Amino acid sequence: MMDEGSSRMNIAIDGPAGAGKSTVARQVAEQLGFVYIDTGAMYRAVTLAAQRAGIKADEPGRLGELTHSLRIELEPGELGQTVKLNGEDVTSLIRSREVTLHVSSYAADESVRTVLAAMQRQLAARKGIVMDGRDIGSHVLPNAELKVFLTASVKERALRRYREIQGSQDISLDQLEKEIAERDRSDEQREISPLICASDAVVLDSTGMTINEVVHAIVNLSRTKLAEAK
Ligand code: DC
């Protein structure tokens, strides 16, 4: 379903790891009839491709070349979004621990960021997009009509991740909390497009809120923006 407002609006949702961005962004897109784009999945796909090719995060030349050569496709799938890398379905592979532990380092590379940001701008050109990531409102789509900075305490984010992966990976809550704090530091401190809250973003702290409540809040914000624009 295409909402009549979709042709006039893009929504950027940024925030730290585990804040619930992808779940929330997907549901917001569904309710508004917009297209959802998970930019973290694109960084993960590049990381997987680089690991397979034996390219390290500190090899900018080779990484840039590789990223340029990749075909990354995001398609609506049964479990959210299907991610294809040169035609191969890598939806599960890009969520592996091996990718999760190293994606921050690959995402810090300037050539990777330049190529992916260009792809993301192209995807958003027709509007009607909900895009989540770290630098969408501040860098990729600075003119997005609605920018949300979604956050939650480190403890709460670790707990959510723990519940999500329980049973499938051998990792303690404490360890998850450390890894999330480390990933925050790395995403916030990198030189290029660090995780920052755009000055015109609405900050939403989802600690103690349900997914439905967060989705509802963002859908309401978007309706207000659309009404203002009329
Ligand atoms: O949202 P996620 O956990 O799937 O993101 C994976 C990594 O990619 C994370 O370390 C941050 C990085 N990332 C980024 O630097 N810029 C984006 N727009 C999206 C993700």
Image (cartoon, rainbow, N blue to C red):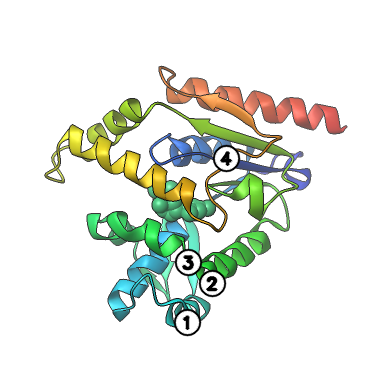
Q: Residues within 10 Å of mark 3 (few under 14, many from 20)?
A: many
Amino acid of disc 3: Asp
The dot on residue 111 is: 2
Q: Judge left or right: residue 67 versus residue 146.
A: left
Q: Position of residue 220 (x, y in %)?
A: 66, 23
Amino acid of disc 1: Gly
Q: Position of residue 4 (x, y in %)?
A: 76, 39
Residue at position x 52%, y 45% in the image: 195
Image quarter in which the N terminus is found? top right
Q: Judge left or right: residue 174 versus residue 99.
A: left
Asked if the residues shown at circle 2 and circle 3 are in contact, with their CB atoms under 8 angstroms apart, the answer is yes
Q: Which residue is mark 4?
A: 13
Q: Which residue is mark 1?
A: 61
Q: Nearer the viewer's eye, disc 1 or disc 4? A: 1
Q: Which comes before the other along the chain, label 2 or label 4? A: 4
Q: Which comes before the other along the chain, label 1 or label 3? A: 1
Measured Cα–Cα span from mark 2 to mark 3: 6 Å
Q: Which residue is mark 3?
A: 109
Asked if the residues shown at circle 1 and circle 2 are in contact, with their CB atoms under 8 angstroms apart, the answer is yes
Q: Secondary structure at mark 1?
A: helix
Q: Secondary structure at mark 3?
A: loop
Q: Which comes before the other along the chain, label 1 or label 2? A: 1
Q: Which comes before the other along the chain, label 4 or label 3? A: 4
Image quarter in which the C terminus is found? top right
Amino acid of disc 2: Ser
Q: Ligand 1: does it lie within 8 Å of the C-beta at label 3?
A: no
Nearer to me, 118 or 60: 60
Point out the residue furthest to the top here.
208
